[in-house]
Amino acid sequence: MAPSNLQSRSTSLLPSVWGWLRRNLFSTWYNSLLTLISVWVVYQGGRGLWVWMFTQAQWTVLQVNLRLFL
């Protein structure tokens, strides 16, 4: 009986998530545009941060000066 109860919860949760997204992020054309632009800006920033962290950041400086931070 517990698995069917869990299954009904997960299937009822999915439409509520889609409904929330539609009501709050895609309710009008300009909300949709702002949402897509915001997602693009966050993606570009995250991608830039990722590239910086793994190609340009000098993490050895932190290891050498760790006592100064603590």
Image (cartoon, helix red, strand yellow):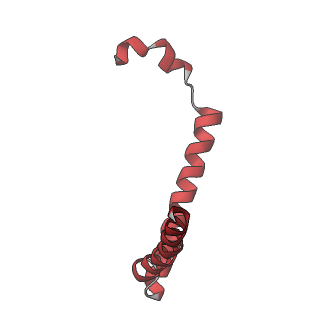
- Of 12 and 26, the residue lying toward us: 12
Most distant residue in the front direction? 1
Relative to 38, does residue 54 appear above or below in the rendering? above
Residue for point 49% across, 80% down: 32
Residue 20 place in picture, x, y as percent: 42, 77
Q: How many marks?
A: 0
Relative to 64, does residue 40 appear above or below in the rendering? below
Residue 1 place in picture, x, y as percent: 52, 66
Most distant residue in the bottom direction? 28
Residue 29 place in picture, x, y as percent: 48, 87
Q: Which quadrant is home to the C terminus?
A: top left
Residue for point 55% across, 24% down: 59
Relative to 12, does residue 39 appear above or below in the rendering? above
Residue 5 place in picture, x, y as percent: 49, 68
Most distant residue in the right direction? 55
Relative to 29, does residue 35 appear above or below in the rendering? above
Q: Quadrant of residue 27?
A: bottom left
Residue for point 60% across, 50% down: 47
